[in-house]
Amino acid sequence: MRFFEPGLCSVTFRSLSVQAVIDLAAVNGIKSIEWGADIHVPPDDLANARDVAARTAEAGLSVSSYGSYIFAPDFTPEDVAAVLETAKALGAGHIRIWPGSRKRPSADYSPGERRAATEALATIAHRADDHGMTIGLEYHPNSLTDTLPSALELARDLDAPNLFFYWQPAPGLPLDDALAEISALGSRICHLHVFAWLADASRLPLAERADYWRACIAALPESGWKKPAFAMLEFVKGDDVGQFTEDAAILRDILYRT
């Protein structure tokens, strides 16, 4: 079993300001924030990234990662350069990358298209390594990690020592299937994205899936990931601040009691 500390993905509250996200995290026992590139820390705005880094540190929090919206292979070298420089300004040594084109399931790829995406991911990992950074592939429906066999194929083909995988269950995924994914991919898992969704993507209070997450976290094996690991809340029922407060308390209980 591995130890995870509580984190927050800033995309959970896209409508809130940077300072409001920081304040909400700090008062609810969150230790680290994954700052998203879509709203709060857009690429190439280095002054903003430095300001967010300073504000985060002043609150006693760390930056777990930079949540980029690079979809491999659909990017330019300039896109990668902007993300790397922004991550550096943010103080993030880890960057989230999306494996594959946006909203495209793995079953839709030809062998040649899959090979191109894999080579693009390897290129990003190499460039990140030049900056002393690690890469984490989003584990998500409609991507090259939307099934366990597809994710394992990527893991086999991408053996860069600085490339890891996030993990989250597909909405409604049965616990036995979640544990099978964790067992197979666990040695390459860096962080977790934590939420409570049904198969139809309707959201529940995290308390209703507390036992599920306890089982998943207890099953995670040791991995090659040597940095602090975070289980990050990502989206809450109704995008509600009050619900987040409840979920953060449940998450802390799951992590510290487990």
Image: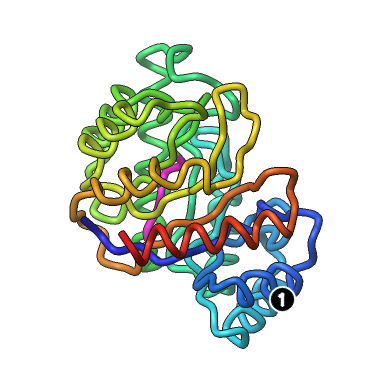
Q: Nearer the viewer, residue 131 or 20?
A: 20
Q: Position of residue 157 (x, y in %)?
A: 25, 33
Labels in figure, total: 1
- Residue 96 covered by magenta stretch: no
Query: Which stretch is magenta?
Result: 134-138
Under mark 1, the amino acid is: Ala
Residue 130 appears in the picture as rendered: no
Q: Position of residue 33 (x, y in %)?
A: 56, 66
Q: Which quadrant would the C terminus be assigned to in this image?
A: bottom left
Horizontal side, residue 209 vs residue 186: left or right = right
Horizontal side, residue 107 vs residue 227: left or right = right
Render colour scheme: rainbow
Which residue corresponds to the image point at 50% horizontal and 75% vertical from the top-left? 62
Q: Is the magenta region chiefly helix, strand or loop?
A: strand
Question: Label 1 neighbourhood size at 10 Å, few (<14), some (14-19), many (20+)?
Answer: few
Q: Nearer the viewer, residue 241 or 90?
A: 241
- Residue 136 covered by magenta stretch: yes
Residue 96 appears in the picture as rendered: yes
Q: Position of residue 178 (x, y in %)?
A: 34, 32
112 in relation to 165, above or below: above
Horizontal side, residue 255 vs residue 83: left or right = left
182 in relation to 253, above or below: above
Residue 147: quadrant of the picture: top left
The residue singled out by tag 1 in the image is: 47
Residue 255: quadrant of the picture: bottom left
Residue 13: quadrant of the picture: bottom right
Which residue corresponds to the image point at 56% horizontal and 43% vertical from the top-left? 70
217 in relation to 118, above or below: below
Q: Position of residue 91 (x, y in %)?
A: 52, 75
Which residue corresponds to the image point at 62% horizontal and 28% vertical from the top-left? 201
